[in-house]
Image (tube, rainbow, N blue to C red):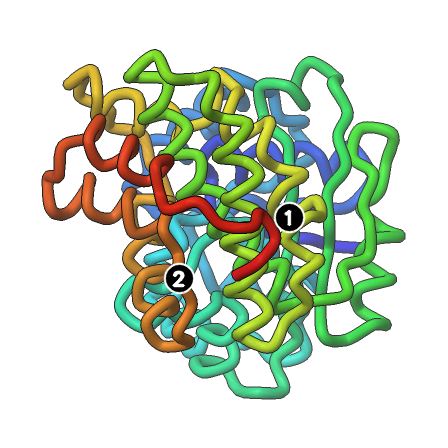
Amino acid sequence: MKISVIGCGRWGSFIGYYVNKLGHETIIYGREQSKNLKRLQKTSKNDYISLDKSITLTSELSFAISSSEVIAISINSQQLRNVAKQLAKVEYQNKIFVLCMKGIEQDTGKRLTTIMKEELGESTQVAIWVGPGHVEDFAKGIPNCMVIDCDNDIIKKKLVKELSSKLIRFYYGHDLIGNEIGAAAKNVIGIAAGLLDGLNFSSLKGALMARGAREVSRLIEAMGGHKVTAYGLSHLGDYQATLFSPFSHNRRYGQALVTKEDYKQLAEGVKTVKALTLLGKKYGVDLPISQAVYEIIYEQCDVKETLLTLFERPVKFEFKN
């Protein structure tokens, strides 16, 4: 199988490295002005991995798309629509697109697979690759389990077969809505975890996990997905990597908000929380954790007061809405 990866940041570069190790002919695309691409072209490595010389590096999007059967996309999720518009101008028909990032369009609340189909056509084959795992761990040979989901079962099974290894064990997803929303929403819960760390309230993470998964399950169900998906690998299964890991950008962003540090790495949850509050209103679902994170980031509400108010909500039965 020939695979092109759109995006050459830490995750995109790792995907190219990983699929190449599995024996797939690999192309990695980056914008011509990309510092990441220039570094890879010059040294064949970044801070985490060294690329095999058989991997082709390119800044020509049309070449990357036309050359491969499978197109993995690993970029800032809020840039997906712009990239999809660029893809629409090249020969993209009969390709399998695999979205390897976790987010929701902030201004519309639309899922990433929806954006792809809006820009490239309803017949476009789009899968997602989600679940726990950091490049820093994978590069050390530490294994994990992840999920591939797609509304086309044949493509889903093909991707799982071609991409599974001892390093990453893939499971078949069975709920595209739930897996997309769950994967994106865990980044918001990750920011909340970082806020707790910054306040030295880390012991509240257990309650955050329990209530966070419950909150997201309600939204998934309201949107037409299966509420149990929130307790799978795309959401609850990704909590360790997002709420506890030192490598989690979202957790570190939340902590930096409290400690007043300048944190410049991409934290997808910052934009995703806008989308979640939008979806909560649209579907009439109470999302107290997401609302609290939104108020702290965008309304500059006091972190300690907002979080303590969240955990002091009125007493009720645990598993009643």
Q: Position of residue 236 (x, y in %)?
A: 63, 41
Residue bearing the label numbered 1: 234
Q: Is residue 269 above or below residue 259?
A: below
Judging depth in this view, the residue of 244 and 124 nearest the camera is: 244
* Amino acid at dot 1: Ser
Q: How many marks?
A: 2
Q: Secondary structure at mark 2?
A: loop
Answer left or right for 269 relative to 25: left
Q: Position of residue 255 (x, y in %)?
A: 30, 21
Q: Do we see residue 6 in this rendering? A: no
Judging depth in this view, the residue of 15 and 51 nearest the camera is: 15
Judging depth in this view, the residue of 225 and 42 nearest the camera is: 225
Please identify the quarter of the rendering in which residue 65 is found: bottom right
* Residue that appears at 44% across and 54% down: 103
Q: Secondary structure at mark 1?
A: loop
Residue bearing the label numbered 2: 286
Distance (Cα) linking label 2 and label 1: 21 Å
* Badge 2: residue crowd in 10 Å (few <14, some 14–19, many ≥20): some
Q: Position of residue 195 (x, y in %)?
A: 31, 26
Q: Residue 133 shows which numbered tag?
A: none
* Residue that appears at 39% across and 74% down: 284
Q: Is residue 148 above or below residue 110?
A: above
* Badge 1: residue crowd in 10 Å (few <14, some 14–19, many ≥20): many
* Amino acid at dot 2: Asp
* Residue that appears at 56% across and 65% down: 220
* First of labels 2, 1 by sequence position: 1
Q: Is residue 85 above or below residue 202?
A: below
Answer left or right for 22 relative to 26: right
